């Protein structure tokens, strides 16, 4: 249970970072292709 909490603590910021990067990437693509 404690191990799982540690894993979540590590993974959550990682997923937030990936999500943020994905949003930034999509925004850039939209600008490039003019959607």
Image: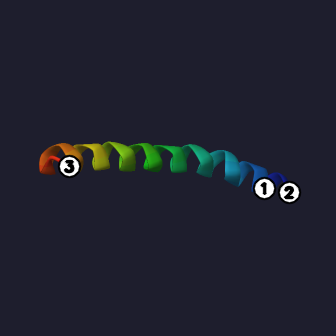
| Residue 18: image location, x then y, percent | 44, 50
Determine the residue positioned at 18% across, 43% down.
31
Determine the residue positioned at 30% across, 49% down.
26
Q: Which colour scheme is used?
A: rainbow
Characterize the local packing of mark 1: few (<14), some (14-19) or many (20 or more) Cα atoms within 10 angstroms: few
| Residue 20: image location, x then y, percent | 43, 43
Q: Give yes or no for contact between labels 1 and 3 (Cβ–Cβ under 8 Å).
A: no
Q: Give yes or no for contact between labels 2 and 1 (Cβ–Cβ under 8 Å).
A: yes
Q: Say left or right for 29 vs 8.
A: left
Characterize the local packing of mark 3: few (<14), some (14-19) or many (20 or more) Cα atoms within 10 angstroms: few
Give me the disc on residue 35: 3
Instruction: Say which label, 1 or 3, has the lower sequence index.
Output: 1
| Residue 19: image location, x then y, percent | 46, 48
Q: Element at badge 1?
A: helix
Q: Element at badge 2?
A: loop
The CA distance from mark 2 to mark 1 is: 5 Å
Q: Which of 22 and 4 is in front in this view?
A: 22
Residue under label 2, please give it. Answer: 1
The CA distance from mark 1 to mark 3 is: 44 Å
């Amino acid at each position: 249970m404690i191990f799982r909490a540690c894993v979540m603590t590590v993974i959550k910021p990682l997923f937030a970072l990936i999500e943020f990067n994905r949003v930034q990437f999509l925004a850039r693509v939209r600008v490039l292709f003019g959607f």
